[in-house]
Amino acid sequence: MAKVVIGLSGGVDSSVAAWLLKEQGHEVIGLFMRNWHDTTGTLEGDCPWYDDQLFAELVAKRLDIPFHFVDLSEQYRERVVEYMFAEYERGRTPNPDVLCNREIKFDVFLKEALKLGAEYVATGHYCRKSEQTVDGKTTYSLLAGTDSNKDQSYFLCQLTQEQLKYALFPIGHLTKPEVREIALQQKLATAKRKDSQGICFVGKVDLPVFLQQKLATRKGNIHEIVPTWPKYARYAEDTTLEGMARPYSYTVRDGKKIGEHTGAHFYTIGQRKGLGIGGRKQSLFIIGTDVVTNTIYVGQGDDHPGLYRRALKVLPTEIHWIDTTEALKTGETRRYQVRIRYRQPLQEATLHMTDDGAYIVFDTPQRSIAAGQFVAWYDGDRVVGSGVISA
């Protein structure tokens, strides 16, 4: 049996993970990390981290395991929140949860756990890990969680072999209802606690208010693009990799002004809420943002062509392979199942590796592809690689 540090978050998932580890005979240590102090823009509670710590301590007492506390808020701000601000300022759509796992939970937090003598670090993620040893070399694979409704492998798509070596995911084989049932049976304080929502360690936020800590409001115009915009046909005719992955480019001459906004950097492709414009037969969706001219472009209807694209691109420096021996070489192509957001059903696609980067061409056009998002590609239930969408 091993010495395992579990990241106790104050939620039911990490609580049950800790119980399972103890049941398996491991020496378990609970470690709570505080990563955020500021409540600017948060929608629920004055000090959500305080409640989380309290519940984590109650669980540790119930399980009779040591409990430790570490403040990683400085590293979290530097590595995750500042990245968020910088990406939104550029008109991109980051995923802070993916960054949090790569930079905090399986880097800074891992190092803290190792200081406590940990052989492994465990979390309450709904995913699994496997390992294979060939000629004395062990490689690790990240697998989707058994519960397809809660599978969180996408959030861990940037992990490396070194990080996976230390990782344990005790609840990856369970469904959420099974986890709740175990928590109730073991009388864990978190058994009926709601799942956390919003930004990792920050919580549910009013995004524009949250971003205004660093990004100023700027009044700009909203222009509507009609579905029959002539250039859509021209984009469709370009079947080169670069052409299929190229985002639609609008100018104010392409559409009619229908309203104003408070800053293009507060909005993202596919967004419906927050525009404050009514009186349309169908809902308005954001189909383009331009932070240079501070203009937002919208289209009516869920089937507006501006919402859908056939392909995306990942720059060479942003391509990540969990097992680098599987990396494609220039000129190679391979079929994968792909997702560009959490809980999106896996989509059939072909990855083309070029000198300019990786192009992913989908069998079916995809909705709301936005620069800054993470794309993850799978082989069955195994995460093979990921990258930041550049265009």
Image (cartoon, helix red, strand yellow):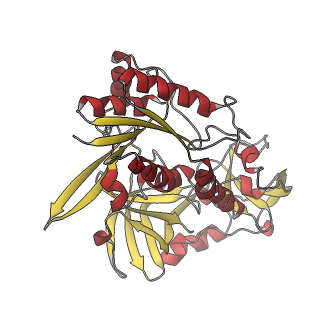
What residue lies at 56% left-to-right and 53% top-to-bottom? Answer: 95
**Direction from residue 74 to residue 2 in the image, left or right:** left
What residue lies at 72% left-to-right and 42% top-to-bottom? Answer: 281
> Which x, y percent locates residue 213?
77, 50
What residue lies at 33% left-to-right and 78% top-to-bottom? Answer: 332
281 or 212, which is in the foreground? Answer: 212
Tag count: 0
> Which x, y percent locates residue 16?
36, 29
161 or 365, which is in the foreground? Answer: 161
51 or 341, which is in the foreground? Answer: 51
What residue lies at 41% left-to-right and 56% top-to-bottom? Answer: 157
> Which x, y percent locates residue 187?
38, 16
Can residue 89 be seen from the camera position used here? Answer: yes
The residue furthest right is 219
Can residue 239 be seen from the camera position used here? Answer: no
The residue furthest left is 135
- Which corner quadrant holds the N terminus? top left
> Which x, y percent locates residue 340?
48, 55
